[in-house]
Image: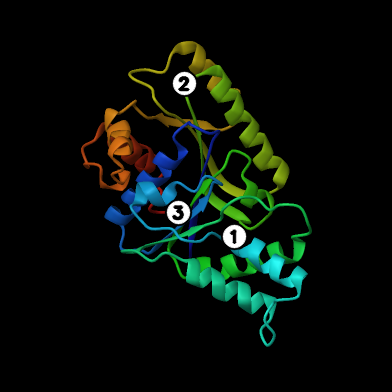
Amino acid sequence: MTVTIAVAGKGGTGKTTFAALVIKYLKENTSGYILAVDGDPSSNLHLVLGMPLEETVGHIREDTLSQVQSGTFQAGISKADYLELRINQALVEGDRVDLIAMGRPEGPGCYCAANAILRNVIDRLKQDYDYVVIDNEAGMEHISRQTMQSVDHLFVISDPTVRGLMAAKGIVELAKELGTKIRHAYLVVNRVNGELPAPLRERTQEIGIQLVGTLPDDPAVAEFDLVGRPLIEVDDGAPIYEAVKEILGKVNILNP
């Protein structure tokens, strides 16, 4: 059974950092295979994982639609088979961690058929992995388009501000409105040194999901980013990774 883990939050809260460290934890504590899905249009997950990225699903979709509209789409192959071939070619393979980047949202035009095909391709792709970790954008674009139909664990990341917590609340409400099946949902507050201030802790009770932990403002994150070093290589004893390990152990992510 594939376990699907999604990470969401407004820009700048550290959701890509958290997603990368979840992948590090799974790689170090299981023998399973992991599919990393970069659902953020900025496509930064490959950088913190230290993996190359040449093409995104969004680009493949745009290119295919352009070929169909211009009449240059090659004969002898169905659009479904063509999209599946291109997506498999775009898959970046690593050491027990493979990566697919969804890319930017679609432009003008009708993408209903293409998205339906994409959903089927990704559903088949997921079956080859023990874990799928999705780094979503704040609007959870790919969940909202149902290219991801169910989630076992949803982590909503916030910064330690009222504005950040209200954005997290909006994400939780959006997830409910979309009707996506989410088995477990948690709130994580990033860049907290020491205890979360009482006023903010009170606000977390308005979010509608459990506050499962906080992450420290670890200088290692900025240092790795400054020199372009993949964060997945951070020391096991780094404060932020210690905090992630504590959170993942608390939710028993290895035994769904």
The first of marks 3 and 2 along the sequence is 2
Q: CA distance from mark 2 to mark 1?
A: 35 Å
Which of the numbered marks, if any, corresponds to residue 256? 3
Type of the residue with mark 1? His
Quadrant of residue 78 in the image? Answer: bottom right
Residue at the image point whose x is 39% and y is 25% from the top:
191
Q: Please state which of residues 208 and 50 is positioned toward the viewer in this rendering.
A: 50
Q: Quadrant of residue 246?
A: top left
Where is 186 relative to 38, above or below? Answer: above
How packed is label 1: few (under 14 Cα within 10 Å), some, or many (20 or more)? some
Q: Secondary structure at mark 2?
A: loop
Label annotation for residue 73: none
Left or right: where 145 falls relative to 109: left
Q: Amino acid at mark 3?
A: Pro
For marks 2 and 1 on the same chain, the one whose residue lies earlier in the sequence: 1
Colour style of the rendered protein structure? rainbow
Tell me residue 97's x, y (percent). Answer: 37, 61
Disc 3 packing (10 Å; few <14; some 14–19; many ≥20): few
* Residue 160: mark: 2
Labels 3, 1: front one? 1
Task: Nearest to the eye among marks 3 and 2: give it.
Answer: 2
What distance separates the C-alpha of mark 3 from that of mark 2? 29 Å
Q: Position of residue 204 (x, y in %)?
A: 54, 23
Q: Where does label 1 land, which residue?
A: 59
> 147 or 201, which is in the foreground?
147
N-term-proximal mark, 3 vs 1: 1
